């Protein structure tokens, strides 16, 4: 499997390259059907030409890590270098990491 070369996260939005989707309508349909059933997910589109998967969601009900974990459960992103399903071993990893990510994302949005 190829590594994920593209991952873009904003609050309520995830766009990720999933090599297993490229050229595979069956995998795209499976991803769309499964991810759309997650609590808080409002839109999923898997593009078989580009391999990109776009997910729009309510960040109060789910998060990027849960969605990426679901993609891994579907057999995608096996060679990816994401740490979405690695459990936090310390309180600081569980709280500070995600908080820092939100702060950075909001700072970048403020610059736009």
Image: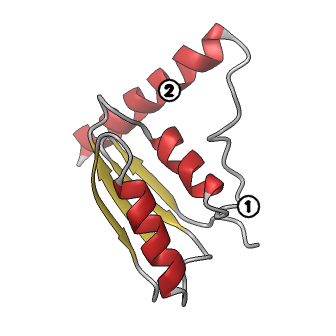
Measured from the top left, where is residue 77 in percent x and y? 66, 61
Instruction: Using the image as rendered, state which of residue 9 and residue 43 is in the foreground.
Output: 43
Cα distance between the residues tagged 1 and 2 = 22 Å
Q: Does 55 appear above or below 12? A: below
Q: Please, what secondary structure does the residue beneath circle 2 have? A: helix
Residue at x 34%, y 56% (from the top left corner): 36
Residue indicated by mark 2: 98
Q: Residues within 10 Å of mark 2 (few under 14, many from 20)?
A: some
- State left or right for residue 100 relative to residue 40: right
Residue furthest toward the top? 91
Residue at x 74%, y 17% (from the top left corner): 89
Measured from the top left, where is residue 21 in percent x and y? 54, 78
Instruction: Using the image as rendered, state which of residue 101 and residue 80 is in the foreground.
Output: 80
Measured from the top left, where is residue 38 in percent x and y? 38, 46
Instruction: Using the image as rendered, state which of residue 81 and residue 40 is in the foreground.
Output: 40
Measured from the top left, where is residue 68 in percent x and y? 54, 50
| Render colour scheme | secondary structure
Residue indicated by mark 1: 78
Q: Please, what secondary structure does the residue beneath circle 1 have? A: loop
- State left or right for residue 56 relative to residue 62: left
Residue at x 39%, y 30% (from the top left corner): 102
Residue at x 71%, y 34% (from the top left corner): 86
Q: Does 97 appear above or below 7? A: above
Nearest to viewer (mark 1 / mark 2): 1
Task: Name the image quarter holding the N terminus.
Answer: bottom right
The mark nearer the N terminus, 1 or 2, is 1
Instruction: Using the image as rendered, state which of residue 46 and residue 5 is in the foreground.
Output: 46
Q: Across the whole image, how many numbered discs are drawn on residues?
A: 2
């Amino acid at each position: 499997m190829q590594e994920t070369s593209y991952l873009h996260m904003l609050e309520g939005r995830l766009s990720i390259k999933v090599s297993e989707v490229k050229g595979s309508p069956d995998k795209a349909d499976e991803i769309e059907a499964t991810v759309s059933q997650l609590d808080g997910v409002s839109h999923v589109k898997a593009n078989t030409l580009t391999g990109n998967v776009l997910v729009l969601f309510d960040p109060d009900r789910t998060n990027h890590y849960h969605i990426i974990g679901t993609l891994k459960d579907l057999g995608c992103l096996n060679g990816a270098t994401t740490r979405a399903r690695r459990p936090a071993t310390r309180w600081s990893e569980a709280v500070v990491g995600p908080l820092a990510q939100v702060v950075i994302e909001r700072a970048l949005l403020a610059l736009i």
